[in-house]
Image (spheres, coloured by chain):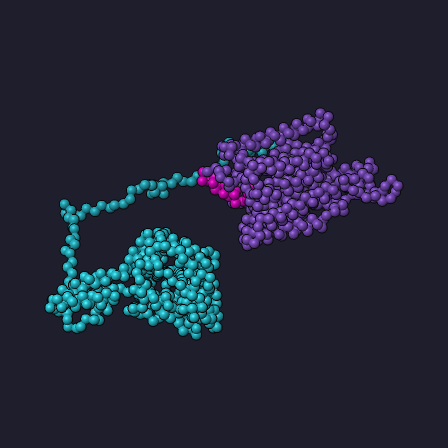
Chain colours: A cyan, B purple
Amino acid sequence: QEFSCQIWGIFFLKKTFKGNLRNYWNFLPEGFINTQLFTRFLSRISQDSAGQFFSSGHTNNWAVLVCTSRFWFNYRHVANTLSVYRSVKRLGIPDSHIVLMLADDMACNHRNPKPATVFSHKNMELNVYGDDVEVDYRGYEVTVENFLRVLTGRLPPSTPRSKRLLSDDRSNILIYLTGHGGNGFLKFQDSEEISNVELADAFEQMWQKRRYNELLFIIDTCQGASMYERFYSPNLMALASSQVGEDSLSHQPDLAIGVHLMDRYTFYLLEFLEDIHPASKANMNDLFKVCPKSQCVSTPGHRTDLFLRDPGSVLITDFFGSVRKVEITTEAIDLTDPIKEVEERPANGDVHKEMHSYVDQLPVSEIIHQKPKQKDWHPPDGFILGLWTLILLVFFQTYGVKHLRHIF
Amino acid sequence: MAAPLTLLLVLAVTIRAALFRSSLAELIAERVEVVSPITAWKRVVEGLALLDLGVSPYSGDVFHETPLIIYLFHFVVDYAEITFMLADVITAVALYMAVKDYNKQVFRKQKFALEADRYPLDCLELIRSPKEIYLLNPFTILSCVAKSTCGLNNAVVALFIFSTIKGNTLLSAIFLCLATYQSIYPLTLCAPAMLYLMQRQYIPVNFRRASFWWFIAQYLFMYLGSLFVLICLSFFLLGSWDYMPSVYGFILSVPDLTPNIGLFWYFFAEMFEHFRLFFLCVFQINVFFYTIPLSVKLKEHPVFLIFMQLAVISIFKSYPTVGDIALYMAFLPVWSHLYRFLRNTFLVSCVLLACSTLFPVLWHLWIYAGSANSNFYYAITLLFNVAQILLVSDYFYAFLRREHHLTYGLYLKRKDGSEATLVLK
């Protein structure tokens, strides 16, 4: 019986090797829980599936979503970013793990005929700007410097947590960039650029500082593939909306709002992501198929040579969602002994309280209370004497007393 | 003419008092055309405050007034407005009485000359007095409302002119010394003062005469002696010689390049350091340079020389303000009889008016709107100074021409009897 159980265990191990533990529970028949065999079986399963538990390598998910263009006519870039934000949030990544950088405010732009909304479908089907959009870097804060600082973690100590990418070596990070770009660069704010070399170096810094486990880089700009050409750090997978020499096109203009609402690639990406739910088994190969040339006009590209796992084994939710692996256990855990409170009893009965205070380095009280009274300056007496003597001398020399009546 | 004078004084005081009470006072007090780093009231207050705190007011670059000003304002700082109004009044009254006296002398001379049949009959004109021009000149009013110590300088110079015209050598020397002590440039007024006093005492201006040199020695002795006394007295006020570099060093070496209506700031702002001393010397000599040629030419007419010198000082000094301009403009009515010989009145008056209005406009454009730059402001400064120079040279020309006409008659005839034209060579 043990033997058969073991075989059954092996069978289950094989079957569950590619799934997560939750799916494993779907296979278990009911009523099988209370035998001791099963307990042993389970512990072995849990030991072995512990390996499977960490097979994907990450324990937390982060997303850095950047829109780099400002001005009203670049509405679609903000809509792109917000669509990905929406998907990512829907699939489980909390706001605390999303760094959203929007270079301009379209929802409250005074040219927006529908204020406080950013639509991503024609006919205003989907408002991606809801009540719970948390923008971390806004407006002119979206600069190349800030972006690189977020990635590498070199931020001034006063930066709040919401603006930091606090990833560790077990984080899977999704980085999504959109805006206007060219061969080898991406334009920020209409005034500066980030080059593909800089980006590659930033990712290398992240790798060396162990700031990511795996990183998915998606870029939706013209000639976007040039941005991932220079990557050289391990565990990077990159997708771009167009090859070098091609322009990424926008999807549809909305006549009510007056601008193009989304770019094609992200539009189809959003459509694809809308079908993903947290338990979805869709993998990266499906993502690579998003937006073929017939729909996108440009040829999307991807790069997986730096990625250690097979893309077919990488789930979409590994990057887009924050799927927490939950292990339900019936074991009781024994906490350690309660922490003893150390009570200090003073030797004598009364409590000796010393008021600790800083040593007075400057006797401020003395200075304040004993400030010498300000004496007004007076000209020296000798001066006054001398001056008026001279004046009187001159006066009487010029006008002898008898001449006074000629003057007046 | 005491009644119109008092009326005018009352009117002027009323205008100034009204402006003092209005909100324009602060506005005007900040304008760079009216106040300069030497004359600003803000700096006087700052210096006195420093003194009250026990620090020498000359430490740092704030205060550039002489110790006598410290002494004066230590007691009257609360009544500053009245002091400045009083200074303006003194200036006006002194100028009025000076010119009245001068009128009398000129009339006397002309009468003598008429009797000696030296003047043709058609050249007599009435000389008007400068009181209206000084008191009601918008420049003066602005200067007074801004409480610029230029008003005090003007008062001292006016008293100097008054005492010179009265003929009092000692007082003239002392007031000139005070004026020089305040700002160095009235030094050049030594020459016309000496010339006038010599004329008055009938000492011929001849280099070979002993009396000439004796008089010069006397005057210079009085002048330098009082200057020495004043400087030593100033030393005793604060017990240190700090004021010398702060006042005189400041005036001569022009470290502060705040824009004003003078010519120094722009040049020195863009000058290379190793040329600075050279150009400083050139610019400063420019002020003193015209003394000797002008005094040679105008040795018979020292009062006109005073006017010319004052004008040259206010154009070429290192930190001119509109108060200095007001002083020499006060003299223009004295030469109102030259009006028929002036050639550029329209041009000069238009340019002066236009520049006066453009100064605040371009300042605003430069400093506040940011759409102009210093070149705009300096262009107007240059234009303003060119207009002033044109005014002064025009008057000079008119004066010389009148002198020529006085000698040779108004309607010039060539030797063959046809009409001749007068050409200034």
| Magenta portion: prevailing SS class | helix
Q: Magenta part of the protein: which range?
A: B37-54
**Residue placed most toward the observer, A192 or B114:** A192
Asked if residue A388 can be seen in this view, the reply is yes
Instruction: From this view, report whether residue B92 is shown above or below residue A25.
Output: above
- Magenta-drawn stretch contains B45: yes
Percent x, y for residue B46?
49, 43
**Residue placed most toward the observer, B134 or B318:** B318
Instruction: From this view, report whether residue A51 is shown above or below residue B49.
Output: below
Residue occupying image coordinates x 62% and y 38%: B283
Residue occupying image coordinates x 14% and y 55%: A337
Residue occupying image coordinates x 87% and y 44%: B418
Percent x, y for residue B253?
56, 37
Instruction: From this view, report whether residue A379 is shown above or below residue A134.
Output: above
On the image, which quarter does residue B101 sit in? Answer: top right
Is B166 on the left or on the right of A360, as rendered? right
